[in-house]
Image (cartoon, rainbow, N blue to C red):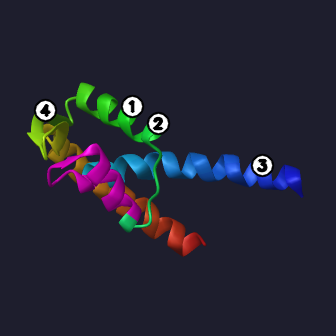
Amino acid sequence: MAEEDEIVESLRLELRRGSLILAVLARLRSEQYGYSLRTALAGDGIEMEESTLYPLLRRLEGQGLLDSEWREEDRRKKRFYRLSARGEAVLGRLTIEWRGISASLERIL
């Protein structure tokens, strides 16, 4: 049974990877900083470690999907992220793709 658990965990992580990207992009339609984003995602039932979130944010920004800026809030500097115009377009296309895949899987399952 332990081997089966390992397989399920590995496959579960693969399933989550793509959906995390979609969730982050969708949440960043409104501006957030890292901690507030993690909290919002957790409230939606999507837990994400900082070690996963921050590299993902940097990668998405590097791809031109996010804009960010440092600002002071509560006497602390925080980096705020938001979806760029390119990110909006990509999110729209990925949402269509996700809905198609999801509908197909629901029929199959």
Per the rendering, the mark at residue 70 is 4
Residue for badge 1: 55
The answer to whether one can see residue 94 in this image is no
Mark 2, mark 3: which one is toward the viewer? Answer: 2
In magenta, the rendered stretch is 26-42
The local crowd at label 4, few if under 14, some if 14 to 19, many if 20 or more residues have their Cα within 10 Å, is few
Q: Is residue 78 above or below residue 7?
A: above
Mark 4, mark 3: which one is toward the viewer? Answer: 4
- Front-most of residues 33 and 90: 33
Q: Earlier in the sequence, mark 3 or mark 1?
A: 3
The local crowd at label 3, few if under 14, some if 14 to 19, many if 20 or more residues have their Cα within 10 Å, is few
**Residue at 29% from the left image edge and 34% from the top image edge:** 60
Considering the whole magenta stretch, tell me its main secondary structure.
helix
Q: Earlier in the sequence, mark 4 or mark 2?
A: 2
Give the residue type at disc 1. Answer: Pro
Mark 4, mark 1: which one is toward the viewer? Answer: 4
Q: Quadrant of residue 56?
A: top left
Give the residue type at disc 3. Answer: Glu
Spot occupied by residue 88 in the image (x, y as percentages of width and height): 16, 47
Spot occupied by residue 22 in the image (x, y as percentages of width and height): 34, 51
